[in-house]
Amino acid sequence: MSLHRLWALSGALAVVLFGCGLLFGDLLASSNYPALNAPGAKVRSYFLHDGFEVRALAFFHVLAALALLCFVLYLQKRISEIKRSSGGAAATALAGGATAAVFLLLSALMYRTLAEPAVTRNAALTHALVVISYLAGGPAVAVPLALMIAVTIRSLRQPTLPRWTGWLGVSAVVFSVLSAGILLGPMNNSSAWYGVLLLAAVLGFAWTFVTSIALASSSDAALTTKA
């Protein structure tokens, strides 16, 4: 397998690594990652008793952020190859995707900070960090990622990408932009805005995964720009 194809697969790798983090944070821990409106005692118990799982969550999401950044750089290269006359589309995709990767990295750092017992024993600080971890890993990732997706589906069309990935991308963009509404609503996991955010995350990562696989498998995936 060529290095170019491996580079294209970095998007799928980012999704897998993200899922590995959730596996530790939600399934292998004693309970799910605390909800935004969870009682303070439950939040404190989770971080004090599941320190290793939280650190693993942070570790895998750091790797996911780096893999996502690699995929963004790959998309930027592919778009610039197709739209040689204008670097605006490629730069826009790069800006959106890189911003999403940075906020995903920030949320991972919040998780690692929360794994420290001295931090968790401060109820106000713990609540603030939990809220920031949700916002940094939620709408702050989804909204700029929507920008990257929108530019990509506009620039990379058939035969580079199957037509149905475009409709998946459009759905991801719509719900990702709407997910910013969580900033207007109550900070709890029962709100309609939180449901929109979850749907945006599923659609956005699904698009990233299938697009990564499609680009790696496409007949022209080995095209490179001559130095």
Image (tube, helix red, strand yellow):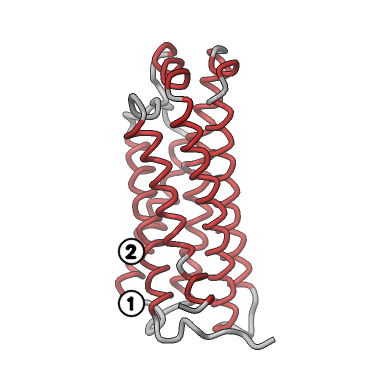
Q: Secondary structure at mark 1?
A: loop
Q: Are marks 2 and 1 in contact (CB under 8 Å)?
A: no
Say which amino acid is labelled 2.
Leu
Q: Is residue 186 above or below residue 7?
A: above
Image quadrant holding the N terminus, namely bottom left
Answer with mark 2 or mark 1, whichever residue precedes in sequence.
1
**Residue closest to the eye, 181 or 38:** 38
Which residue occupies 39% across, 29% down?
Answer: 33
**Residue closest to the eye, 160 or 66:** 66
State which quadrant residue 66 falls in: bottom right
State which quadrant residue 217 falls in: bottom left
Residue 18 in picture, x, y percent from top left = 43, 48
Would you say 207 lies left or right of 72 here? left
Which residue occupies 34% across, 50% down?
Answer: 202
- How dense is the environment of label 2, judged by Cα within 10 Å: few (below 14), some, or many (20 and up)? some
Q: Residue at label 1?
A: 162
Image quadrant holding the C terminus, namely bottom right
Would you say 191 lies left or right of 111 here? left
Q: Secondary structure at mark 2?
A: helix
Say which amino acid is labelled 1.
Pro
Residue 184 in picture, x, y percent from top left = 46, 33
Tag of residue 168: 2
Residue 101 in picture, x, y percent from top left = 56, 52
Residue 27 in picture, x, y percent from top left = 32, 34
**Residue closest to the eye, 67 or 202:** 67
Would you say 158 lies left or right of 146 here? left
Q: Distance between the Cα atoms at labels 2 and 1?
A: 10 Å
